[in-house]
Amino acid sequence: SALEQQLDGRMPAGTLGIGHTSWATHGAPTTTNAHPHTDQSGRIAVIHNGIIENAGSIRKALEQRGHTFKSETDTEVLAHLIGELYEGDLEEAVAAALRDVDGAYGLAIICEDEPGVLVAARKGSPLLVGVGDGEWFVASDASPLLQYTRSVVYLDDGEMAVLSRDGYRIRNLETNRIDKPVNQIEWDLTTIERGGYAHFMLKEICEQPESLCNTLRGHLLEDEGTSRVTGLNLGDDDLKKIERIVITACGTSWHSALIGEYMLEE
């Protein structure tokens, strides 16, 4: 709603764009640290899910070569690295940069010098290509694409997608082209929408009884009053050898972890 107020009905013009909603993984949640981030020239823009583990060392090397940074983010470091390697081919610059990067990423990159091209890549962070009618999309999840298309291509780690006005193609970080199947989304958008609630938080609060039942279904044996945990592939002897169980959680899931602690201790 805040973004809608700022736009005030003035939608950006163009046929190619990137946008991102994300918390700050590096630095404070400020406008300066918000995506997209650009390279030294300001002509290459990047949005990014994930964390670049060696961003600190890359930043120092780039600063020694004259780069200056506006934000505290690892994403801007990646944008500068791509910009330094750019020699007229965005696709190859991205591939070369990612060969020097450690960490996780779901990326979408555009360049002012190549107005009809969008390059996307993933490693450890979900990414898919939406195949529409004369239009193509990149997203980290299928749900925002359902109003445009139900045909999607899921990228695997180490793969890149290159979108242009003529279509899309998938490749790895070397030069090998990859043929991937187009999947059809069967579920409906109404299953993940607000369902008449004022906002998603209220919807999720009211759905807690149903969510709890769905989570426990198949794990509780009502006639015996006991539970079973499937998927661990541990026998009784293996379970007896376990001396300590750690549940990691943050935020509201921490409260669930506390309840789980009491249940496990019992």
Image: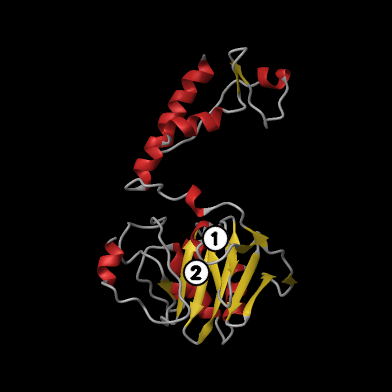
- Residue 104 is at least partly visible in this image: yes
Q: Say which residue label 2 marks.
A: 78
Amino acid marked by disc 2: Leu
Instruction: Decide which of 160, 33 is in the foreground and name it.
Output: 160
Q: Is residue 61 visible?
A: no
Mark 2 vs 1, N-terminal side: 2
Say which residue appears at 73% left-offset and 22% top-offset.
Answer: 235
Q: Residue 244's x, y, as percent? A: 57, 23
Q: Secondary structure at mark 1?
A: strand
**Is residue 24 positioned above or below 163 on the image?**
above
Amino acid type at circle 1 is Tyr
Q: CA distance from mark 2 to mark 1?
A: 10 Å
Q: Nearer the viewer, residue 232 or 217?
A: 217
Task: Classify residue 101 as left or right of residue 206.
Answer: right
**Could you classify mark 1 by the number of other residues whose Cα lies within 10 Å: few (under 14), some (14-19), or many (20 or more)?**
many
The number of numbered discs placed on residues in the rendered structure image is 2
> Looking at the picture, how far across and down is residue 199, in whole percent?
34, 48
Quadrant occupied by the N terminus: bottom left
Name the quadrant containing residue 174. Answer: bottom right
Name the element at disc 2: helix
Above-or-below relation of 111 to 69: below
Q: Which mark is residue 105?
A: 1
* Front position in the image: 120 or 222: 222
- Return the x and y of residue 82 as percentages of the image width and height: 53, 75
Q: Could you say which disc has been placed on residue 263 in the image?
A: none
Disc 2 packing (10 Å; few <14; some 14–19; many ≥20): many
Question: Which marked residue is nearer to the observer: mark 2 or mark 1?
Answer: 1
Q: Are marks 2 and 1 in contact (CB under 8 Å)?
A: yes
- Measured from the top left, where is residue 163 in percent x and y? 59, 76
Q: Quadrant of residue 172?
A: bottom right
**Residue at figure coordinates x 41%, y 47% from the top left:** 195
